[in-house]
Image (cartoon, rainbow, N blue to C red):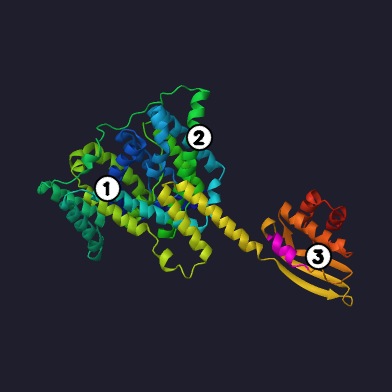
Amino acid sequence: MNIRNLNVRSPNLRTLKREWLPNPKADLLAGAVVGLALIPEAIAFSIIAGVDPKVGLYASFIIAVITAFLGGRPGSISAATGAMALLMVDLVKDHGLQYLLAATFLTGIFQVVFGLLKLGRQMKFVPRAVMIGYINALAVLIFLAQLPQLTNVPPTVYVLTLLSLGIIYILPRFTKAVPSPLVALAVMTIAAIALRLDVPTVGDMGELPTAPPLFSLPQVPFTLETLQIILPYSLTLAIVGLLASFLTASLVDDFTDTPSDKNQEAKGQGIANIVTAFFGGMAGCGMIGQSVINVQSGGRGRLSTLSAGVFLLVAILFLQDWVRQMPMAALVAVMIMVSIGTFRWSSFTNMRRVPRSEVIVMLTTMFVIIFTRNFALGVATGIVMSTVFFSRKVAKLVLFDRVLIEEGAHRIYKVSGHIFFLSRDEFLASFNFDELVEQVTIDLSRAHLWDQGAVEVLDKAVQKFRRRGIEVTVIGLNEASATLLNRLATDEELVASGQS
């Protein structure tokens, strides 16, 4: 009995150790870097959404901690994000914070349901070209978001930014004991305080909270009218949030060469948003930029995500004096590092070797997101374009083998490929309707009819032969194609031949 129990438990213990303690020191230090970098971003995203800075800070703490335990991708960072904040602007403007909290709760419910329905499996339908376009666009937007911090500022800001970048990129050549971004943040903060430098700081971004988040229900009427108000926002937030989280998880998968559980990620994100709604936080999702910081700083396990959330709260509650004086130039340098590390440079250097259609999809996805700031629209556009390109390619893969028997009186067309609405022209063009034969056999044993367009074009081909006095027989239909033909074909003889 003891041996049997040991055999059952040991895989779980190994999993816990692999996910939580692959390298505790690196995870803790990486989490500290991420926690500090989250502070100005959470404040900025709160301002975008039109709410108090503490709404974004509380959300970032709660979401990071909960996804550390319940998320499906160890090492991934989730918190308040700009993509979600942009979707909240009108709701906050028209109805206020409490309706945002209610919408955040419903967002979480949707995401949990999506996870239970295992919709994470649908990520395999997002083409790689779309993912690369999304990641490149995010890298560009991260960089562009830093430009206001480098515009109309004292020359000292540029000096601090360059020195910070120097520490970030040069220090790892000598030692990796401590993440170089953390060293840059610490050194620049000490320098700014010691030298009394007059430069923009984190404290200039907004007021930091002085107390931990407290539990409270969203103060909205529980009526159908409230549901009608928040439902469209919640559904959009849920979909965009999961899309961002899945893409973040996929990116970390690539960086670490380890798998993730997308369905568990959906449930974890949902539970995190449900909880944050009860503690005054806005909805959040996976953050590619912060996840890149975490991974590049050595974070791999769930401890790094937990550390980021906990360090964020500790920093804003107990280290406020230091955090307020942290120069924005140092954080700008960290985010520039993130944008450089996130951008897939190979997507441009390898353009000549990649199929042209994939390059077009990648660039379109990228530019739609950059110019509209709408990640969902960019990804949807890329998926639609990929579908069209793929369908056109498949439509051209209809092959015909023509055999003439019985002294030239009987022509057999052996068709191979997928017949659907886009392959109609290729299908019809492959027949010689003017050939002087007595009988034609269309052999579809290596073909498949997919839709009404396929049945229509087959019907049309048969009718054209019969109008010329040629006897036509259709053979070899598989069961699914025969069923479709039986339902949709208008020619009774064609239906009968398909059933034979």
Q: CA distance from mark 3 to mark 1?
A: 67 Å
In the image, what residue occupies the spot 71% across and 59% down?
Answer: 424
Label 3 environment density (alpha carbons within 10 Å; few <14, some 14–19, many ≥20): many
Q: Which residue is mark 1?
A: 148
Pair 1/2: label in front: 1
Q: Residue furthest left?
A: 195
Q: Which residue is mark 3?
A: 442
Q: Position of residue 162 (x, y in %)?
A: 21, 58
Q: Position of residue 75 (x, y in %)?
A: 38, 51
Q: Position of residue 121 (x, y in %)?
A: 55, 50
Figure quadrant of the C terminus: bottom right
- Judging from the image, what secondary structure is the residue with disc 2 in? helix
Q: Amino acid at mark 1?
A: Pro
Q: Which mark is residue 232?
A: 2
Judging depth in this view, the residue of 181 and 9 nearest the camera is 181
Which of marks 2 and 1 precedes in the sequence? 1
Q: Is residue 147 rendered to the left or right of residue 396?
A: left
Residue 427 is covered by the magenta coloring: yes
Residue 396 is covered by the magenta coloring: no
Q: Is residue 102 rendered to the left or right of residue 176?
A: right
Asked if disc 2 and disc 3 are in contact, CB closer than 8 Å, the reply is no
Q: Position of residue 224 (x, y in %)?
A: 53, 24
Which of marks 1 and 3 precedes in the sequence? 1
- Judging from the image, what secondary structure is the residue with disc 1 in? helix
Res 15 seen here = no
Pair 3/1: label in front: 1
Q: Amino acid at mark 2?
A: Pro
Residue 87: quarter of image: top left
Q: Majority secondary structure of the magenta segment?
A: helix
In the rendered structure, which segment of residues is drawn in magenta?
423-431
Q: CA distance from mark 2 to mark 3?
A: 51 Å
